[in-house]
Amino acid sequence: MSEFLIKNGYVYDPSQGINGERHDIAVKDGKIVESASSGATVIDAKDKAVMAGALEIHAHIAGPKVNVGRWYRPEDKLFHSYKRGESTRIEGGFSIPTVFKTGYEYARMGYTFAMEAAMPPLYARHVHEEIHDTPIIDEAALPVIGNNWFMMEYIKNNEIENNAAYVAWLLRQTKGYGIKIVNPGGTEAWAWGLNCLTIHDPVPYFDITPAEIITGLIQTNEFLGLPHSVHIHQNSLGLPGNYTVTLDTLKLAEGHTAKNRFGRKQVMHSTHLQFHSYGGDNWGNFESKAREVMDYVNRQENITIDTGNVTLDETTTMTADGPFEHHLHGLNHLKWANVDVELETAAGVVPYIYSPNIKVCGIQWAIGLELALFSKDPMRTFITTDHPNAGPFTRYPRIVTWLMSKKARDDQIKAFKYSDKVVDATEVASIDRELTLYEIAAMTRAGPAAALGLSQNYGGLAPGMNADIAIYNFNDETTDPAAIEKAYGNVAFLFKDGKICVRDGVIVDPGMKHTFWVDVKVKENKQVMHDVREKFLKYYSVNEGNYLVPESYAPHQHVIALDATQ
Amino acid sequence: MNTVTLTVKQQPEIILEADCITPDSFAGKTAAEIEKLPVYQGKQNCTLGDYFKVAGKAGSTPAETQIIVNGDCSRVKYIGMKMSAGEVVVNSSTDMYTGGWMKGGKLVVNGNVHSFCGLGMEGGEFIINGNAGNFLGASYRGDWRGMQGGLIRVKGNVGSDIGTFMNGGEMIIEGNADIHIATHAEGGRIVIKGNVNRRIGGQMVKGEVIVFGTVNVMMPGFHYNQDVELTVDGVTAMFQEYNGDLGERHPKRKGEPVYGKLYLKK
Ligand SMILES: [Zn+2]
């Protein structure tokens, strides 16, 4: 394999505390190395920022509900499709891009890893088929477990070890990476036409509360020592006044300690917090509670969060939070799709337009930015759009620009139809903070890598780590918002595993992607295997034998093997 | 106003997609530059000059540009798409998507248009001096934004599904219409001087449909309200007013529900 020497660049690597100093980076055989030989190809990075490849911690980019979005929204592709390039396939779609466009667009922005945030276990094969077809970026998927019948029964009976054995079995069956919780209990309640709007609302029939589910799953996660913590989409998403539910949920992490061999410190990752930081009790007096939420997050060190920034676009919302999508459809009357996934979960899909002419959308935009701007620890605060829910991930360059430039924020506030009302309901207009490239690198590289338990190989530029390197045409001197946005959206170079995959924003190599999953060895558990057999016979529409995702669905897999028998 | 004349010199092998035939893309260009504009035949990239002889010179803005198209364009799609100003006159029939997403100006087709014409139209005037196919002034497949504004006038008959998801503007059909008129509409007005087959206003929330001729079968979701006198396209007459679709949600204004309106000439 080829050798490279990246010279003269400004390096931003929070994992090593390197803040914009000039460092040469040497690459050999897919890894970063101490030094290069004289035969190495020299890449001149003068005046450019050099960072590790970025990691997406939460996006909906593969699987059945993404595909429902694709097939029921042909209009999303209408004016957003591009013909094939020299080394790319046809690219289509804006908020629900094709798998090819998904891989290319992440790579053009400097991303080399993405987590599919909600894999319905029963449809894991579909998720892996799409992951396999998404070029360049490495990926993993989180099976949704927060409304699973097995889990609710084990946790109700306080059987954490049995639940852990079941989760280990499920991760192996689905080639999953960790524990995703979506509207705990509420999605099961939705099958009864109900919801759980606080963490103490009991789930019908199972008679367990969201608080018990979350706590039980934190214990399960740490019992198994998984690389990632529980990853939670909280109850009461998107409703005015929900910040109290959010704080109640975050407090469930108190007293728990991360137990794992990956250097992960958090026991809870709270996702798309923008949707959960709402004050007021109706859309008229709707306001930001980002400060209250971040005050708690800043103090509580065993929590990580991602923002879920609203990008002010027409997009497609999709979530395993079935009741929320029904609620949203009632608000905007646009087409609604809903699926029930047997014993496991559900999903809903509704298009949504975050219009700068609507007050609430302006406030949501402000809340997402406030979360990042109020953060005292960029290593625990990550940038997402909950793609495609708050907007497409392809808007990261614009979000980074808003975070790095007060002028860019002020220009957007001025452009709102109801700027005064947005300013009154939020604090964004009075925040002077402009994030530095070092902080952006923490929020998009070193931070998410640590939270996912991947910091040994990802998110940094130390010798021995993967040679996933993004080189951008900007540095800390760049202040023009348009220049920041353009540079972040079109990497000068992207190295993936030591190979140049993007040059000047153009894909030049399809890369060699890997699918990550976690295989945990647990003590033989006859009880759990009996329960699995029984539930498949009694309730599932498929046979147990047809549930497994075979090797052929993830031919380029990277298995993280764990032993939880001790 | 400057005039650019296009004359068909060669029929395309498969249907030609020519969304560049608009005052917006011609404005400020010479004939030679216009000949170089891209058109598509399937996955092949071609130029307008491969299929049309171009004469004259465009104005400096779309509003100062008139385009006259001569020759058989019945296999040319997307003429006038997204045009914002100026004028296009086609002395022929045209294929699908003519006048799609039009924003302003005037588009005249001296012939028939195929289906999916005037989709999502926002403004301007679209005159069809022949017949139109299905989905005239409707939304694109999957979309909920049909005709939003402007005027479509058809001298002849139209097919089915006109004004699906229409929510603004006016469509005047001087001949007859087939099934499915203003399905899912949330605004706008459709006038049909001739007869309608059936299914007017299915799942209609708001908007108006006015029929001068007969209706084969009425929708069960429309109920008679009152007789009213209306002046429609210069004609004053008495109409029976129906409210509907009663099976659909309806917004309220001053506490009263707002219905879709169907007017049948007495
Ligand atoms: Zn999500």
Image: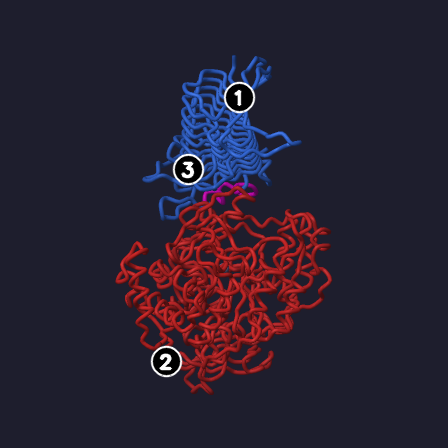
| Residue A541: assigned label | none
Q: Nearer the viewer, residue B3 or A45?
A: A45
Residue B115, relative to residue A127: is it above or below? above
Q: Secondary structure at mark 1?
A: strand
Could you tell me if the residues under marks 3 and 2 are in contact, i.e. CB atoms within 8 Å? no
* A277 to the left or right of A109: right
Among the chains pictured, the one given blue colouring is B
Q: Please check whether the numbered discs 3 and 2 fall on a single chain.
A: no
Among the chains pictured, the one given red colouring is A
Q: Where's residue A245, x and y in %?
A: 59, 60
- Which residue bears the numbered disc 1? B242
Which circle, 3 or 2, is nearer the viewer? 2
Q: Nearer the viewer, residue A384 or A107?
A: A384
Q: Where's residue A185, x and y in %?
A: 48, 58
Q: Where's residue A84, x and y in %?
A: 39, 56
Rate crowding at label 3 as few (under 14), some (14 to 19) or many (20 or more) other CA atoms within 10 Å. many
| Residue A565: assigned label | 2
- Which residue bears the numbered disc 3? B77
Q: Residue A487: which quarter of the image?
A: bottom right
Q: Secondary structure at mark 3?
A: strand
> Label 2 is placed on what type of residue?
Thr
> Label 3 is placed on what type of residue?
Lys
Evaluate whether residue A48 shows in this view. no
Residue range in magenta is: B25-36
Q: Residue at x 47, y 63 (%)?
A: A181
Q: Nearer the viewer, residue B134 or B8?
A: B134
Which circle, 1 or 2, is nearer the viewer? 2
Chain under label 1?
Answer: B
Mark 2 Cβ inside 8 Å of ligand 1: no
Q: Where's residue B13, x and y in %?
A: 32, 39
